[in-house]
Structure formats: C-alpha cells, structure tokens
Image (tube, rainbow, N blue to C red):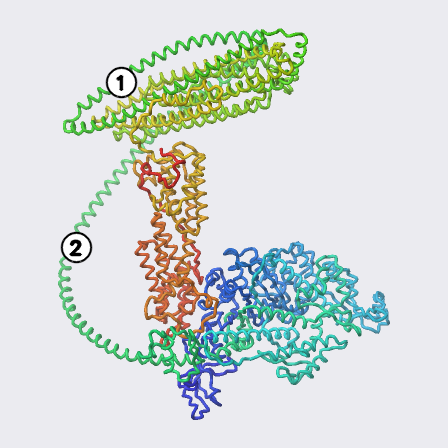
Amino acid sequence: MSAAELYTKGAKVWITDPEVVWKGAELLQDYHDTGGQKTLQIAYEEGGEDTITIKCKDNLPPLRNPDILIGENDLTSLSYLHEPAVLYNLKVRFIDKSVIYTYCGIVLVAINPYEQLDIYGNDIIQAYSGQDMGQMDPHIYAVAEEAFKRVARFEENQSIIVSGESGAGKTVSAKYAMRYFAVVGGSNADETQVEKKVLASNPIMEAIGNAKTTRNDNSSRFGKYIEIRLNKNNQITGAHMRTYLLEKTRVVYQASEERNYHIFYQLCAMAQQPAFQKFKLGHQDDFYYMFQGSNPTIDGVDDAAEFKTTQEAFSMLGITDKQQMMIFQIIAAILHFGNINIQEVDPSGEQAQLNESQELALSGLIEATRIDRNDKHLPIMCELLGINQDQMKKWLCNRKITTVGETLIKPLTVTQASFGRDALAKHIYAKLFDWIVQHINIVLSSGSKENKFIGVLDIYGFETFEINSFEQFCINYANEKLQQQFTLHVFKLEQDEYVKEQIEWSFIDFYDNQPCIDLIENKLGILSLLDEECKLPKGSDDNWCRRLYDKHLKHKHFAKPRMSNVAFIIDHFADKVEYQSDGFLEKNRDTVLEEQLNILKASQFELVADLFNDGAKETAKKSKLSNVHMRPGKQPLKGQTMHKKTVGSQFRDSLSQLMETLFSTNPHYIRCIKPNDVKQPFNFEPKRAIQQLRACGVLETIRISAAGYPSRWTYPEFIQRYRVLAIKKDVVKRDMKQTCRNILQKLIQDEDKYQFGKTKIFFRAGQVAYLEKLRSDKLRACGIMIQKHVRGWIWKRKYQKIRRSVLLVQTFGRGLLARRKALYLRRTFAATKIQKMVRGHMARKMYKQIRFTIIRMQSYARGRFARERYVKLRQDAKATVIQKMAKGWLARRRFTKIMRGLVLVQSHYRRRKAKLQLKILKVEAKSVEHIKNVNKGLENKIIELQQKLDVKNKDILQLHRDQMELFNARKEIEKLKHTTENAKLSSNKISELEEYLRILKAELEKEKQEKKDVISEKEILKKDKQMIVEALNNENKSLKDKLNEANQRIKDLESHNTSSDKVHHQVAEDKQMLLDEMAPEREHHQRLVKDYERLQQRYDNLHDEFLIVSGVGLTGKGVSRTPSNLSEISIDTDTDTGTGTGSDKEEKKGKTDPDQGYGTERRPMRDTLLRKGLTEVEGQWKDHNGTVEKKQKADRRTSTSGLLEEKKDDSKEDVTLLLKLQNRIKVVEKEKRALLERLELGEGELERVRTFSSADDVAYSNLHVQELEMENSKIKTEMKKLRECITLDMDSNSGKGGQAYKEFMDQFQAMADELDRRREECVQLRSLMAGRARETHDIANEHYRGSIDIINEDNEIVMAYKTLQQVTRVQENQIEKQKRDQKCEASDFKEQIKELKQENERQEKLIGESLESLSPEKRLEVVIEYEINRLTSENLDLQEENDKLNETLKKYKKALKKLRNKGSDNVSDFPDLDELESSMPTPLKHRDREYMGMLEVNKDDIQQLVRHLVVDLKPKVAKSMIPCLPAYILLMCIRHTDYSNSDDKVQALLSTVVGGIRRVVKKQAGDVNTVSLWLSNTCRLLHNLKQYSGEKTFQVENTAKQNEHCLRNFDLSEYRQILSDLAVHTYQQLLIQMMEQVQPTVVAGILENEAIVGLSGSKPTGLRGRSSSRDMVSDDHIHTLDSMLKMLDSFYAVLATHAVDKELLKQVFRQLCYFIGATALNNLLLRKDMGHWSKGMQIRFNLSHLETWVRDNQLKDSGAIQTLEPIIQASQLLQAKKTDSNVDSICEMCKDLTLSQIVKILNLYTPADEYEEKVPLTVIRKIQDKIKNRKDQSKGNSLLIDTKYMFPVTFPFTASTIELEKLEVPTSLNIDDFVKRM
C-alpha cells in the first residue's frame, strides 16, 4: 500500500500556517495520484474550508497521527515522524497535561514551565533510583539514573549535555542532575559532605556568572563542564569544573531591562551591615556599572537572602571569612572603578595641572584627560585594592610608548581612557572569576583514586539576535561542534540497532555540518584570518571583513549582506546568522595596558597581587578562555610579536579538548526549550518552539529515525495486537516469527516497508497507522455484528418484562385498594377508643398535679417558719459560748504572760549560779585527786552493776519458766476450745467437717513432720558449729601455751647477765644503734595501736547502735553508753603527758600531739578524718534506728487492724496480709545485713590502716600475739552470752525465735570472719617471730661471737615486757567495758521479751473476741487457715535459714582449707577437714520442694548470663523452647533481685539486657528471624514487668499465685519505658528489612503481573523501546505475585513461630501493605505504559489476591486492607468511565487520592482502541474544581506517597498464663552455672 492511498476523505492532515506554523485540517475528498489531481478540499478544525494546491504526490500535506498516539512520551514512537507531529505532541503534553519532559529517541526535551513544580523532591529521586529508563515517565532523573547505572555496571565514563537558549532552563536542569548524583552517589541516603560541597558550587557560580537578561532572570553567561568523579564503590569522591567564555562585557555594560552579575546587587543589598560598611557602597542605582539596564530588581528574589546563601556556600567550600571579605572587597572596588569620572582637559585653563607629565607640557595642541582631585571613588577604589592612588590616576589618563631610543608618555582621549578603565574592570573581574573556579576545583578534588566520572555540560545554545557580535559567533561555533557530535552519535545508535537485529539496511543520508566547521576553524578560516588581523599594526575590523569577502565569498555557508560592508552571514545548521564585525578585533585581543597591571601586581593585598602574577605556563594549565593579551599601546612596534594566544584561538583549543572528552564518554542529551519570550507559565508559542527544535537537533533526530525504521514491535506484542487480522491457518503456535510473516505478507504487499529482525519487526513510517486502520475496520465490522444480535435480544427481553410487569401491577393494585378500606375501618374505631382514654387520663393528671402543688406549698411555708426560729435560738446559744471562751482565753493569756516572766527571771539567776559552779568544777577537774576519786567511784559502780546483773539474770530465768508454763496452758486452752467448738457443730455437717478436718490434720502433720526435720537438721548444724568452736578453742589454747613458752624464754633472757666489760661496751653501742633504727618503727606501731583502740571503740558503739536498731521488741528507749576505760585512760594519758612534756603554746599551735609511749607522735589529720567518718556512720545509724522503729510500729498496727477487719467482715484470715508482714520483717533483716556489710567494709579500711611497718620488731610481735589472745577470749565470751540469751529467748517464745536466731547467725558470721582474720595474723606473726629470732641469732654470731644473751644486756626486753603489761591492762579494761555492754544487751532482751509477751496477749484477746462473734463453722475455718499460714511462713523461714546455714558451712570449710594451707607448719593445730565432714551427720532428704518462680544470679555473672541468653542465642535453638522463654528467665532473675532488695543488681541486670538486645539487633539487622525473635522477647518482657508490677490495672487476669509473685520493692516504670523504646527500635528495624526484601517484588507482582489470560496490558502501539543499561544485563530473579505472597507467608511464619503478639503482628502487616500500596502507586504514577483500563483490571485482580491473603491470615481488622485503598482506587479510576456525567462518582470513589494523583492518572490514561476516547480536558478541570471544594483537605496535594512513613506502633498489654514456678531452664541455654533456681 502506497502512502498516497492513505489520503482519503476524512483523513486528518497538517497545513502550514504563518502564525501557528502548522494547523490541523481534515480532507473533504479522496486524493487520486493517477488522475493528476492538483487540488484538495480541506476543512480546518477551528472552522472554515479551503482548497490547497498539490504540485505532485511528494507535495502532499503531512498526515496526522491517530488520536490514541497523541501525547506519547517518546516522539519517535509516533507513526508519522515529521515536524508538525513533533510540535503538536509537545504542545499537548505541555499545555493539556502540564508535562515538561518528553523523549525524542536519545534526547530528553525539557520545556521551561516558568514556575516551580513539585517533581524534584527526594521521594521522586527514590522512585527513579534503580528503575529502567524506558519504564518510567520522562524525567531528568531518568537520564541521570541511566548515566549512573552505566558508570556503575560497565565502568564507562558518561556525559550529560544540557543545551538550549538563554532562559530555557539549562542551569536548573544541570543543577537537578547534579543533585540526583549527590543523593544516589552518597554514602548514605542523605547528602554527605562531599556531595554538599559539589552542590554548594552552584550558588557561587550563579552569583558570579549568572545575570538577568531579557529572556531569563537567571541566565548563565558562561559555559561549564563539571566532572563528578566516583570511586570503585560508586560514591562521589570529588569534582572538577571547566568554564568557557565568560561574558566579561556585562561587567561594564548591560542592555535595557538587563542586569549585571548577581553578586554586585547582593553586595549592595548588604551595604548597611557593619561588616560591609568599609566598602562604602550604597544603593545599586548609585553605580554606573549597575543601573544601565534600568531594571535592577527581579520579582520574587531577595538579594540579601541570596547573599547569605552565597556566603554559606563559600564557607562550605573552605573559603575562609578573610578570603571572602577580600573577594567582596575586590568586587566593591570594581563598582567604584566604574564611577571614576574621566574628563577632558582644557589646555588653556588647566595648564598648572598638566606639569606632572612632560607630554602634557606642550602648548595644548593635543587632547588630554584628567580625573578630578575631588573624585571620591578613585581613593576608595585604590584603598580597596591596596594600590597607589597617584600611579593609578596617572596611567588611567596616559599611556607609555616605547621606541628604539626613548620612552614617551602620551595622553589618552576621553574615549580611550574610558575604554581602558572598562577593560581593566573586566580583566579584574575575569581574573577573580578564574581564581574562584580554581579554588573550587582544589576543594572539590579528592586525594583518593578516581576510576570514573560523570560529566555535566551546561553550555549556551544556538543564539541569534538583531545584532550579533564576537560572543554569539563563539557560541554558535561551539554549537556547530556539539551538533556534529550529536548527529554522529545518533547515526551510530541507529546503525548499532540494525546490526544487532541483523536486518538489511541502506546508508541513511543525514546533514553533515563539517563544511561549516571548516569555514570557521580551518587554515585561512574565519578564526585564522581574525588572528592574523590582530597581529597587523594597522589591523581593523573593516580590513578583516574585506579579507573574509575575498577568501570565502564563494563558500556555500558564507555570504555577504546586500546593504553592508562590515557584516557577514554564516549558514549554520540551525539558521543563517548575520554578524557585525565591529569590535571583533578588540574582543579577540582583550587588551589591557601593562602599566595598569603592574600597579595591580604591586598591591599590598596578597590576593589582588596573586590574581595578576600568574605566568604563561600556569595560565595554559588552567585552560581558561579569558586570558589577556597585554600590549603597551594600541599599536605595537614594528618587529614586536605577540606571544600569547587570542581569545578565539584559546576558545578553539578548549573546545577541541571538550570534544575529545565527549567522544571518549557515553553521551546523554537534554535539550531545553523556551516556550515563550514573556516568561508566562505554561504558555506555548509554536514559532519560538519550532525555531529551537530546529536549532537543538531534535528534528534532525526525527529525520534520521524516519529515514529508517522508526516503529519497532517485538513478536509477542505484534501477535497480541494484530491477532485479529489473521486467520487460523496463518497462526504457527511454536513460531511467532513465522506467524508475523504470514500476517504481514497478506496485509502489506511492499516488503521494503518492514523488516524482520532477531527479536523485533521494523516498520517504515506510516505502516503502523495503516495496520491500526485495518484493525479498527475489522473490529468495527465485528462490533456491528455483535450489536445486531444483542439489540434484538434486548428488545425481546424488554417486551417480556413489560408484560409481566403489567399483570403484576394489576394484581397488586386490587389488593392494595382492599387493604386500604380495611385499614380505614380499623383506624376509625381505634381513634374513638384512644380519644376516650386520653381525655380521662388528662383529667386525672390535672387533678393530681393541682393537689400535689398545694400540699407542697404548705410544707415549704411551715418548714421555713420552723427553720427561722431554730436559727435564732442557735445564734443565741453560740453567742453565749463565744463570750465564755473569750473571757477564759483572756484570763489564761494574762496568767501565761506572768508565769513566763517569773520563769525567765529564775532562769537568769540559776544560769549565773551554774556558771560559777562550772568554773569551780573545771578547776577541780584538772586536779589529779579528782581523777582518782572518779576512778574509784567507777569501780564501785561496776561492782554494783555486776551484782544487779546477776539478780536480773535470775529473774530472767524465772520469767522464762513462767512463760513456758503459760504457753503450755494456752495450748491446752486452745485444744479445749477446738473440742468444744467441734461438739457444737450441727449434725448435718459433722461428717463433712470431720472429713475436712482429717485432711487438714494430715496436712498439718505433714507440715509438722517437715518442721521437725528442719529443726532436727538445725540441731545437727548447731552441734557441728559447737564442734568447730571447740576446735577453735583448742587452737587458742595451743596459742596460749606457745605464748607462755615465749614469756618463759624472755624471763630466762632477763636472768642471763654474765658478759664481760668489753663485750658489754660493744653491746651497748650496738644496742643504741638498734634502738635508733627501731625508733621510727616503734613510733609507727604505737600510732597504729592508738588508732586501733580508738576505732575499735567506735566500732563497738556502732555495734551497740545496730543491736538497738535490729531489736524487735524494744520500746524505743536508747541505751546510754559511757566512754570505755580505755578511752578514759587515753584521755588521762594525753592530758598528763601533754602537761609534762609540752608547753601550752605548743598545744594551742597543734603542731604535734603529746607522746603516747615510746616517744611516738599522733597523726592529727588522719585521726580527724577517721573520727569524722565514724561520726557520720553513727549519725546514719541513729537516723535509720528511728526510721526502722517507726516502720515496725506502723507495720504492727497495720497487721493487727487488718487482721481484725478481715475477721469481722469476711470471717476469714487474710493470708496475703500475713505474708506481707513476713516480707516486711525480711526487708528489715535485709537492711540489717546491708548495714553489717557496710561495717565490715569499715573494718576492712581500718585493717588497711593497721599496716605493720616494723614487722621485724620482736617486742611488737609478742604484743600483737597477746592482743590476739585477748580478742579471742573476748569473742568467746560474746558468743557464749549470745547463745545463752538467744536460747532462752527461743525457749520462752518459740514463735518469735526466728528473728533472734537470725541475729545470732549474723553475729556468729561476723565473729567467724574476725576469727579467720586473726588466725591469718597469728600465722604471719609466727613467721615474723621466727625470722626475727634467726636475724637476732645472726647478729649475735656476727658481732658477739654467737652469744645471744648480750643483746639483752641493757634490759631492753624487760622494757618491752613492761610495755606489754601496760597494753594488757588496757585490753582488760576494754573487756570489762564489753561485759558492761553485754549486761545492757541482756536488759534490752528482757524488755523485748516483756513487750513480746504483752503483744501476744493483746493479739490473743483480739483474736478471741473476733472469734466469739463468729459462727462455730467459720471460727473453725479461720483457726485452721491461720495455723496453715503460720506453719507455711515458719517453713519458709526455716528453709531460708537452712540454705543460709549450708552457705555458712561452705564458707567455714573454705576458711578451714585456707588456714590449713597457710599454716602448714602447724597443721596439728587445726582440725582435720575430712574428719570434720565425716563426723557430720548425713543431711535429711526432703520431699520435693515447691519453687518460688525466681532465679538467683550473682552480679558478677550478669554479663555471662546475657551473653549466653541474648547474644549467643540462635533462632533455631529458640524455636525448640517455650516461646519467649528468655523473657521469662529474665523476669525470674528480676524477681529475685526484688526479693533480695538489691537495687544495684537489678539496675545492672536490666541495663546489660537492654544493651545486649541492642547489640544483637544492630549486628543482625539483616536477619528477619533474629530481629523477630528479640522483638517478641522484648515485648514479652515489657508485658511481664507490667503484669508483675503490682498495679491493679495489669492484675485483672492474674491468678492468685501470680499476684503473690508481684514485685514488692522496686518500681521499674522507668525501665518499662526503656524497654518500650527498645521494642519500637526493633520493630522499625524489622520493618525496614522486610520492606527491603519485598520492594523488588512489588512492581513485578502488582503492576506487571498479568494474571487474567487474554487481557493485554501492553501499550497499543509499537513504542520504540528506550535503550538502557538493563538491555545488557539479564535479571537473575524474575519476581511474580506468587513470589511476593510466598515472601509474606515466610514473614508471617517467622513472627508466629516466635509468638509475636497478635496485635503487633497486625501492625507489622499493616505497615507492609502500606509500603506495597505506596510503592505500587508511585510507580504507576511515573509509568506511561500503565495508563489504560486493561492494566487497571490486572492491577485490581492482583490486589484482590493480596486482600485474600490478608483475610486468610485473619488480618482483616488490622487496617492492612485500608492502606491499600489508594492503589485500589487508582486501579478503579483506570477502569471507570471518564465523562462529564461521571465526575461526581469519580470524586466519591477516589477519596484517598490527592488531586495531583487523580490528575496525573487521568493525564496518563491512554485509550486501548480508537473506540475509546482520551479523557477530555473539561472532565479533568471539573474534577479539579470538585476536589478543591472538598472539606477534608488534610491529605495535602503531593504527587507521590511517602514510602518511608511508618504508622505509630503500640504494644497492647497481654497477660501471660505461664506459671513461673513450673518453668524449667533448658540445658541448651548453658546458663546453669550462672543461675540458681529458688
């Protein structure tokens, strides 16, 4: 079929038009090429008919594409590829769909919308990241993503070439491309420091290189190529920028309505700031270089705010504040430079001023210039640049001419001087521009290895103005080079595609602009001639232009204007451009006087000097285009040569280097189009657009594509689309290619119109449209046939339905009339009846109301009168009482005042008497006789107290006997009471109660038996302890014997005195030497003894205080303690010694304390610190004493009152209350143990103080041995008395013996530890004594010839023995004091026993009274329950005691082993451990114990526990256990810490657990199994802490046992919050990992999966597939809907396996469904191929599978389906009718979609066939108006959904039914060594 055959009546064509370029029309007649037809009748779309002339069939108007192809996102996919089709398609997308991006083969066409669009956010970047370029809507991010993927996958360098006219949006496009690379090429999702620096270069370059023009408010006036460099990991490591052809002329001149560079205006906006006032700037209109354009403002731009942005960018790039201020200072100097006024000099009037120059001394025949001395801008400029003002003033008005023999200075004219000023200003700015670019490159460079880069070229597009000069010439020259590269690349791609598909093809003719390039750059070309003209002495623009005419006038790309001799025309690839030659030479030279540059080089500012001191090598290295040719004057001397390149030649070289770079990379093209010249948003002018399309190469791409095979279909797509045109025999099932061949051979006769490739069919232009026409005709015929049969069936069905309806209406009508009549009769009778009853009711109601009102009024009146009378009587009575009280108060106040005065007088008198008496007593107290009398009185008192103590002991024994008899009597009474009550029981309950009593007795016997077992075991342990004590006593005896032997040896040494006189003299000298050596050690020892005695006394005081605190029955009366005898002796000694040895002044100075024996001195500072520390401890004990007593009294009152209330109300004993009392007692005991531990720590500190520094002193060793013996005897005495007291207490009150027994065990433990310490010291002293004896023997052998007796020649040993005796007396006094203390303790115990007896009697009375008020049955139940509870608590206490005794026994064993190891030299002194163990009876076997649901763990083992239980726990191991078992184990450990009231341990445990879970979650963040495990356990632990917190809100579902297990001491609400935060963090990590795994399956499973067979979701036309990086990479994994559902199944199974709470599991899948829906909707909105009804049906079908999965897993009420509503509504919108009548239904259906999303879907919608229309623009507008009027606008108007949004997570409390006491710890956890089950 030929193309002419398509021109039939009704065909749509394009007609040229001078205003809109192309106008749409429709043929009114067929065209016949055989008949020589010359005209065609057409009708325009806007209206009107016309006749066009057809010269030949090749002159036919272009055909229009079918409507279903209009708005395609790729211009090359159009069936007809020509200029009008491209222009119209761009207009439809831009105006109707508000889409600015369109593909044109490999080119992205971007139309400037002139307003901000919300399509560049991070969400859009994430949506395009990783996506295929051909699948997504056209966008600059798609091009950037394609470039990034090619770099990453194929290691190819890439270039993105952005071109277009000024104002087309090149700079913005390049900026968005770099932003995309910064985001996806960063180390994280956010921009890193390197990426921020890359982006920070944009504001700087815009400030110094962009300006406002008539076409663009932010036009780039230079070209730049930025290389973004990447490392092996595809992360940005740096960048490099190259700039091209800065428009320097703009610095000194701006056209109308234009501005200078932005930085000048930004600097003026900050002129009033303090930091910038030194620049002396003002308003922008005050400067010549800024107000020439007469429009210095830009709408919507704040120059001050932009300046701050520029400063921030400078700081980001490492330019210091000082450098910044210097840059701004140079820019300010340029502004002042422009305001320098150069005037012409009048020689006659200004002769005096011309004497400065010899040249100006002439007679005024030459023209000269000057600068007014009052010009304020010249000194400011020179000051800012740091240069000499006079020199600059001179060389601005003069120039130097150098000849062969002399140098002349010639004045300049005003024009020359002004030109020189402007040239210097331009040169300064250009140098500053180059310096900033160089510094940016240094900052952006990276030291790391850079493997590849992506280049972004932002360069000017083809330009043509009314007056075109040198700048436009260079710009169009660069575009010629770029167009050549573009054309070659497009041709290469077409060629590669044909070769790849192995089809036959012929050479495609394309426009080659190489001749035009040769015209410009070849030898004797335009640039060469320009450079030659610049070298000539008298070269001019006119001469150069004439030479061009001579050389190139015959060139086909060169022409001469008819009316000008100073212009020339070049025929560029885009258009013909006329250039004016005026200024070409000067701009090419870029001349600046050398004298002016020398002044700048001598600047006092380093930066200014550096700008002009760069050499030629450095300049060439930078590759800058603004290099300057410097010459001393306008015309160089003959013979001089210019060594530096001109601007044109340098631009040519840099352009060649750029082209080499582009040819070495894989290019991507972005062509920016300016839609109109008035900058109006979304206004499309076809004339301006078609000019730019021709200039930027888009139409050339279309032409190359159209010359070949533009339409391409894969074989499956072709068969799916055109299967309707085939017959059955044409289809070959196993060979798609053959099937397509059979179809096309019948439909298209010309085989040149198509080609069969390996995977595609290639069609010539127009063939797809022809196939679409055949398909539509076939479908139309089928539709008519279907309509014929369907309409007949519809009318027949309609007739039958009408007939049935008529019969049915008649039947119901007759019945209705009959029912209406019956209803009327019933209603009449009922109304009569109702009226009668209502009237009677109303009358009765009225009567009752009136009667009630009257009675009420009477009552109110009578009551009021009575109340008034009553009030009056009461007021009288109160007045009488007030008077009485007032009179009495006045009398008492007077009496009190008198008494206060009397007492005050008495007190003053008595005080004076007391002072006198005090003075007398002080004098007496200082006398020695007084002290002796006091000591005698104390001895008498001690004897009297001893006698009283014996009497009291006898009384206590008698009381114990009485109490035992009383206790036995009470037992008999209770038995009698039980017998009496049982006899009174009713006969009908006897059998039942007997059975119940029998069970209780059995249980009681069981408990008693267990109690007996425990008691017997306790007796055994007592015997064991007695044996140990006896062994220790034996050891002490042996030590005493050894001590006696040592004393005997000392006596023997004293009797030995038979040495000679010579030896005696020598011994005396040696003895003196030894004494001198031993003196410091004696002093130190004496100080330690003193310190020990003082600290021991304070320890005894604290111990007594502790006993008072720990007493249960004390009445609160404190035991007053007097200082011990030791303390008194120490005081006396201090006083006497101080009086005898030191003066009063020395005592006041306090330099040294008096001697304490052996000449030692006390250490006042150490004693003061120790005294202060012990005083603080005593104060804490006293405070604690009062607190504990108050708590005990409060607990007693609470327990008693609670017991009685329960008995009276419920007639039942509250077991919980008794257990609470027992727990309170345990708490007090724990506090007591904690205080004991603190005392032991204090003792440890004292032990460190008591360090032996003189271990070699034998006297000291003997003294310490004697001291240890005294301590041993003291400990024995205390142990004996404590045993007796506690035994008596237990015998007298067996029910309260547990407390006393604990006190005894604590005391016993402390004494045992003290005994161990003393033993170790004994062993050390023995070894020291033996060593000292050996040393003494050695000294005797060395100095005294073996005679040991000589050593004691001066009786030094006797002196040591006397000292020991004194120390012994001190210790005896101390023992006496301890005896007195024990007597006080005995009296305290007696008082305690009395109080306990009184308390027991009181409670028995209360219990008896309460029992008498109860019935016999309830009374029996109460008594039995009380006994059971009491026995239970006793058993618990006994079990605890038993455990403690076992632990104590273990400690003793360890201690004995240590002693045996240390004392190996005296093994016989210690009992044999094996014999001791063998002598111990075998412990009794108990029945199975009931566990308490607690696990004990030591604080040191917490780290090991967490490591095994948390860090090393694998999900596979956890699956084999009870769900959330680690959480329960941790709870049991926490319960034990609460039970033991260990605050430090619980903090350490919880902190370590939280830290361990955090580490595991962070380390295993990618493992869904592990994260799910710890999410479940964290939530379970959180719920457990709530359940066992004791708060009533969490105890609703608890059992009684669980309530007993609640925490008693700790409030862990803070840790609950920490665990809640940890659970949230774990939950988020889990979701992030799940979403990462699900994301690859969403698009494939929801959007691309075509589950409905036969319903195609492909595009309706043969779209040219976008070549992308994915074409070269095959996917390893093909995702489907089933794979996504299987992944969700695996997630669900993992969460269910680890017993994640159901509510939390619902929240997880709600979030996952939201992510799936949001990801699918975002991809749907950005993909063109999804916009038709069949795809909507496929998506809805896929979503139904997902909804079914949610329902099958019982997640319907989780809100997961609701999160899918947006994508569901989007699929429904694709399927819905889109007409004016459906606007309301569409708005109602799409409640969860925003306006932008709805409009985007409607714009994306593509009809599947020509029968279906596109969505009319009017419908879209109505929908927009309807949705804008919605009341609910909370959803916003964003296009994409935030896929990273997470719903707030909650953790609803769920109670656990697991019983902690029955939990077993598996051995697989390996924590048996760290935990102990309680």
Vertical side of 1271 occupied by 116: above or below: below
SS for dot 1 = helix
SS for dot 2 = helix
Q: Is residue 1579 left or right of residue 601?
A: left
Q: Quadrant of the N terminus?
A: bottom left
Question: Can you give x and y, in whole percent of width and height, for residue 648 in the image?
Answer: 67, 73
In the drawing, what numbered circle is on residue 835? Answer: 2
Q: Is residue 1831 visible?
A: no
Three-letter amino acid code at the position of disc 1: Arg
Tally of numbered tags: 2
Q: Residue furthest bottom?
A: 35
Question: Can you give x and y, in whole percent of width and height, for residue 1670 in the image?
Answer: 46, 66
Vertical side of 807 occupied by 1506: above or below: above
Q: Nearer the viewer, residue 809 or 82?
A: 82
In the drawing, what numbered circle is on residue 970? Answer: 1
Question: Can you give x and y, in whole percent of width and height, for residue 97 in the image?
Answer: 45, 70
Q: Is residue 1199 visible?
A: yes
Three-letter amino acid code at the position of disc 2: Gln
Question: Spatial distance from mark 2 to mark 1, Cα to Cα?
Answer: 85 Å
In the drawing, what numbered circle is on residue 1241? Answer: none
Category of crowding for the residue at label 2, using alpha-carbon neighbours closer than 10 angstroms: few (below 14), some (14–19), many (at least 20): few
Q: Is residue 1467 left or right of residue 1286?
A: right
Q: Quadrant of the C terminus?
A: top left
Category of crowding for the residue at label 1, using alpha-carbon neighbours closer than 10 angstroms: few (below 14), some (14–19), many (at least 20): few
Question: Can you give x and y, in whole percent of width and height, for residue 188 in the image?
Answer: 51, 55
Vertical side of 1283 occupied by 482: above or below: below
